Image (cartoon, coloured by chain):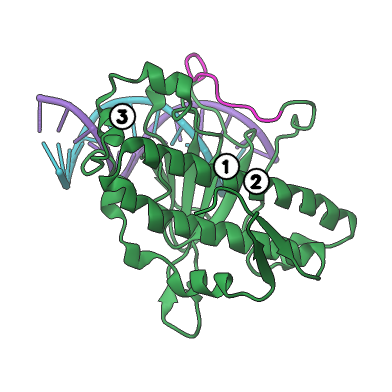
Chain colours: A green, B purple, C cyan
DNA sequence: TTAATTTGACCTGG
DNA sequence: CCAGGTCAAATTAA
């Protein structure tokens, strides 16, 4: 696989590009879910590298979408009309934009609870909400007003490394039908904060962490529950093929 | 026995 | 006051 590529969108408005990018991000997530399990038997360094590469690519798409959103908003278009858009991307705090790229929760000591709405977030829709290459621990579940399904709250399992990353998973009320086939349960996944647990600095400091040893040895079974839950059959393959064959997207590999 | 999840209570912002 | 996010004890799974 090439490590870098650019996607050129032919024609259409910023809104069209936004839709395509969102779709691309969603399918990339599914591709990641499909590929990463193959690293189970490979060396852990490759798995870590793959995870970081996927995250970087998704972050890049995020950045482009943010810029396009700016253009789109200036042009009077609203995201609310987008069929794929189910949640805002880059929900930024009122303090953001003042040189603060993002804020992490420093510590809950002495400040028992704190909302995460002041943290930058990114959201996507996927059929494989549990598998994204990171190890999450569930810390809560809540029934949300007007929602058919409860929302689950997860935080990075490596909290001892002060990793501030959290995410929420909300199953969509109405499943999506793809290519006239049976309905697939889709989930809105919202990520808050960035993983610092995979930083080199923190990783070196966690050399003695048994869970990390397991990951680095490529023996994920038992240590990373997300792998156990993952079934490659869950991947939205028709949609994946659809986007790869999409004539509107020219994949220029450079 | 340890780790992960569940669940009701608590807290905070709107 | 309410909805949503978090805590932490209890429970379950490995």
Q: Judging from the image, what secondary structure is the residue with disc 2 in? A: helix
- Magenta range is A101-111
Can you say whether A10 is above or below A118 in the image? below
Kindly tell me whether residue A65 is visible in this rendering.
yes
Residue A64 horizontal side relative to residue A189, left or right: right
Residue at horizontal 64%, vertical 37%? A120
Question: What number is the disc on residue A6?
Answer: none
Question: What number is the disc on residue A60?
Answer: 2
Residue A237 horizontal side relative to residue A58, left or right: left
Contact (Cβ within 8 Å) of mark 2 with mark 1: yes
Using a 10 Å C-alpha cutoff, classify the residue at mark 3 as few (fewer than 14 neighbours), some (14 to 19) or many (20 or more): many
* Number of on-image labels: 3
Which quadrant of the figure contains the C terminus of chain A?
bottom right
Instruction: Report how far apart the C-alphas of labels 3 and 2 lie in the structure.
Output: 27 Å
N-terminal of the pair, mark 1 or mark 3, is 1
Q: Position of residue A237 (x, y in %)?
A: 44, 71
Query: Where does label 1 land, which residue?
Result: A56
Q: Position of residue A13 (x, y in %)?
A: 82, 67
Instruction: Report how far apart the C-alphas of labels 2 and 1 lie in the structure.
Output: 6 Å
Query: Where does label 3 land, which residue?
Result: A212
Residue A188 horizontal side relative to residue A218, left or right: right
Q: Chain of mark 1?
A: A
Residue A239: in magenta span = no
């Amino acid at each position: 696989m090439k490590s870098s590529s650019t996607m050129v969108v032919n024609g259409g408005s910023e809104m069209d590009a936004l839709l395509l990018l969102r779709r691309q991000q969603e399918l990339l997530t599914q591709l990641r879910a499909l590929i990463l399990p193959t690293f189970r038997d490979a060396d852990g360094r490759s798995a870590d590298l793959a995870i970081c590469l996927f995250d970087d690519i998704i972050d890049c798409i995020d950045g482009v979408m943010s810029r396009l959103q700016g253009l789109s908003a200036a042009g009077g278009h609203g995201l609310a009309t987008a069929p794929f858009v189910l949640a805002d991307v880059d929900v930024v705090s009122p303090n953001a934009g003042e040189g603060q790229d993002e804020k992490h929760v420093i510590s809950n000591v002495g400040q028992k609870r704190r909302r995460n709405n002041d943290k930058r977030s990114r959201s996507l829709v996927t059929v494989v909400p549990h598998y994204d290459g990171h190890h999450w621990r569930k810390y809560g579940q809540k029934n949300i007003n007007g929602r058919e399904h409860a929302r689950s709250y997860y935080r990075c399992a490596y909290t001892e490394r002060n990793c501030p990353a959290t995410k929420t998973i909300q199953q969509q009320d109405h499943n999506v039908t793809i290519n006239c086939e049976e309905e697939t349960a889709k989930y809105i996944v919202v990520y808050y904060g960035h993983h610092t647990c995979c930083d080199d600095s923190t990783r070196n400091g966690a050399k003695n962490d048994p869970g990390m040893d397991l990951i680095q040895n490529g023996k994920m079974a038992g240590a990373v529950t997300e792998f156990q839950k993952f079934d490659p059959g869950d991947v939205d393959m028709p949609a994946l093929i659809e986007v790869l064959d999409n004539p509107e997207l020219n994949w220029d590999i450079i």
